[in-house]
Image (cartoon, grey):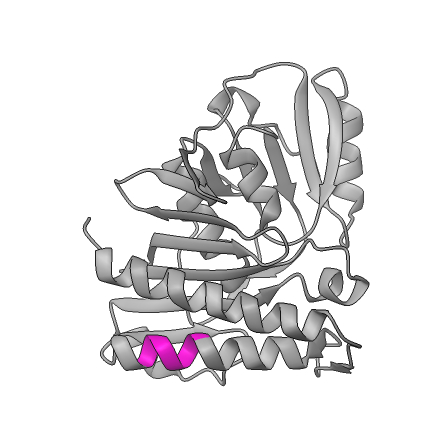
């Protein structure tokens, strides 16, 4: 699938949004709270404006679903939909631990076919287009991403801000398989698996389409497996944007664990 223009525009928008985020990050951060009690900052809003304006200008026929943009259901009639989280990991941004990202994905007929994840603090850029592989650009280096081939001594990556009893149970029941549990914020967890620095990520709690769409394309193009917890496909540009079933990311099929209720 050739999406060269889409990839270039989304990379540029992600980097410019990241630069704006870092301007705000360097000062004092004022926090508001949405109706669902999730935090919102000036960085979320300004990064969103940069990305949405660029995508609308360059691809006026594509629809957009963004965490910080009012949702309009006419997107459901469009085969092409940008899925955007202008600041994934707002809690980490507020804590100033550096573990936040800019996520831009493109879905086609409900499948994620392009993913861009930019890490403003480290200036690392992860990207993938379906059928073309996944890559990490940092400094002046460009590396093709490949998941690990490990089946034992696994590194499990877990959310820094969201824990669950189900995850604790999974770890306990399979502790002979795990060498280490790493905590990380935002879509960085998927990136760690894509580049082979972690092997397994199970998410039991609620997320939204914009949390996973970019990460899924990158993980899959790096050779990983990304499924909902019932092993069904994760689809995008849905009427209900919540990922209600949870999901897992694994480096290979041998590391799909049986989930006991």
Can residue 232 be seen in the rendering of this structure? no
Please provide the residue range marked out in magenta. 51-56
Q: How many marks?
A: 0
Q: Magenta region, mostly helix, strand or loop?
A: helix
Q: Is residue 37 above or below residue 168?
A: below
Q: Position of residue 117 (x, y in %)?
A: 49, 54
Left or right: where 81 falls relative to 213: left
The residue lying toward the viewer, choosing from 180 and 110, is 180
Q: Position of residue 106 (x, y in %)?
A: 34, 61
Judged from this view, the residue extending furthest toward the left is: 2
Left or right: where 14 falls relative to 41: left
Q: Is residue 44 above or below residue 146?
A: below
Can residue 148 be seen in the rendering of this structure? yes
Residue at image position (54%, 42%) is: 191
Q: Is residue 203 magenta?
A: no
The quadrant in which residue 136 appears is top left
Left or right: where 48 falls relative to 239: right
Residue at image position (32%, 80%) is: 56
The residue lying toward the viewer, choosing from 258 and 120, is 120
Judged from this view, the residue extending furthest toward the front is: 140
Residue at image position (44%, 42%) is: 140
Q: Is residue 54 magenta?
A: yes
Quadrant of the frame with the C terminus: top right
Q: Position of residue 151 (x, y in %)?
A: 57, 15
The residue lying toward the viewer, choosing from 196 and 255, is 196
Q: Position of residue 159 (x, y in %)?
A: 71, 47
Q: Is residue 241 above or below residue 180?
A: below
């Amino acid at each position: 699938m050739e999406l060269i223009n889409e990839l270039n525009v989304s990379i540029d928008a992600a980097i410019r949004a990241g630069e704006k985020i870092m301007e705000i990050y360097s000062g004092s951060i004022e926090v508001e709270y949405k109706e669902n009690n999730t935090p919102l900052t000036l960085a979320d809003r300004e990064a969103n404006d940069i990305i949405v304006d660029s995508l609308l200008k360059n691809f006026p026929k594509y629809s957009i679903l963004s965490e910080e943009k009012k949702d309009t259901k006419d997107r459901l009639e469009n085969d092409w939909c940008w899925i955007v989280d202008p600041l994934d990991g707002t809690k980490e941004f507020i804590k100033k631990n550096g573990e936040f990202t800019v996520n831009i994905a493109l879905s086609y007929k409900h499948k994620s076919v392009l993913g861009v994840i930019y890490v403003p603090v480290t200036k690392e850029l992860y990207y993938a287009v379906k059928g073309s592989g996944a890559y990490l650009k940092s400094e002046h280096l460009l590396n093709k991403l490949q998941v690990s081939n490990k089946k034992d001594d696994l590194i499990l990556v877990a959310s820094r801000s969201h824990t669950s009893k189900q995850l604790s149970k999974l770890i306990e029941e399979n502790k002979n398989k795990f060498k280490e549990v790493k905590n990380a914020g935002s879509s960085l967890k998927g990136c760690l698996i894509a580049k082979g620095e972690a092997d397994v990520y199970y998410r039991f709690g609620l997320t939204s389409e914009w949390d996973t769409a970019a990460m899924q394309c990158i993980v899959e193009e790096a050779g990983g497996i990304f499924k909902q917890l019932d092993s069904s496909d994760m689809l995008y540009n849905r009427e209900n944007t919540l990922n209600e079933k949870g999901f897992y990311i694994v480096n290979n099929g041998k590391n799909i664990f049986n989930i006991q209720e």
